[in-house]
Image (tube, rainbow, N blue to C red):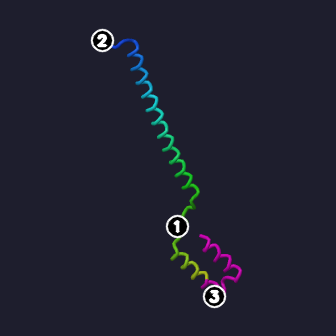
Amino acid sequence: MRGGRPGLIGTVARTAVIAGTATVTTRAVDKRMQEREMKKAAQVQQQVQAPAPTGITQEEKMAQLRELAELKQMGALTEEEFQQEKQKILAQ
């Protein structure tokens, strides 16, 4: 057995182990970062595809429809105008 510093083969072997460990670690970190970026991109895409809320509640829709019906009863709207406006409200 030899004492002191390792020989050339020992140094080369140690360097190879350290380099291999560094490579594996770097690849694992890169893979994890790519997965995170893919998840973020998927979330952004889902948000873009999801319809934006119009901000009108069911109660507000009902109030608008009642008001529309009153205007029709008073003769301010024709049947055709009533139906067009009704569809607009329901589409919101």
- Of residues 77 and 13, which is closer to you in this image? 13
From the image, which quarter does the C terminus lie in? Answer: bottom right
Residue 28 lies, with reference to residue 78, above or below; the image says above
Task: Residue at 41% x, 19% y: name it.
Answer: 13
Mark 2 or 1, closer to the camera: 2
Q: Amino acid at mark 2?
A: Arg
Task: Residue at 51% x, 72% y: name it.
Answer: 57
Which label belongs to residue 73? Answer: 3
- Main SS of the magenta part reads helix
Mark 3 or 1, closer to the camera: 1
Answer with mark 3 or mark 2, whichever residue precedes in sequence. 2
Which label belongs to residue 2? Answer: 2
Q: Quadrant of residue 22?
A: top left
Where in the figure is residue 11, as x and y percent of width and height? 39, 16
- Of residues 49 and 66, which is closer to you in this image? 49
- Of residues 86 and 68, which is closer to you in this image? 86
Task: Residue at 62% x, 83% y: name it.
Answer: 71
Where in the figure is residue 26, as x and y percent of width and height? 46, 32
Q: Amino acid at mark 3?
A: Gln
Task: Residue at 58% x, 80% y: name it.
Answer: 65
Start-end of magenta stretch? 69-92
Q: CA distance from mark 3 to mark 1?
A: 28 Å
Q: Amino acid at mark 1?
A: Gly
Which label belongs to residue 28? Answer: none
- Left or right: 37 as drawn, with respect to 87: left
Answer with mark 3 or mark 1, whichever residue precedes in sequence. 1
Question: Badge 1 is on which residue?
Answer: 55
Q: CA distance from mark 2 to mark 1?
A: 80 Å
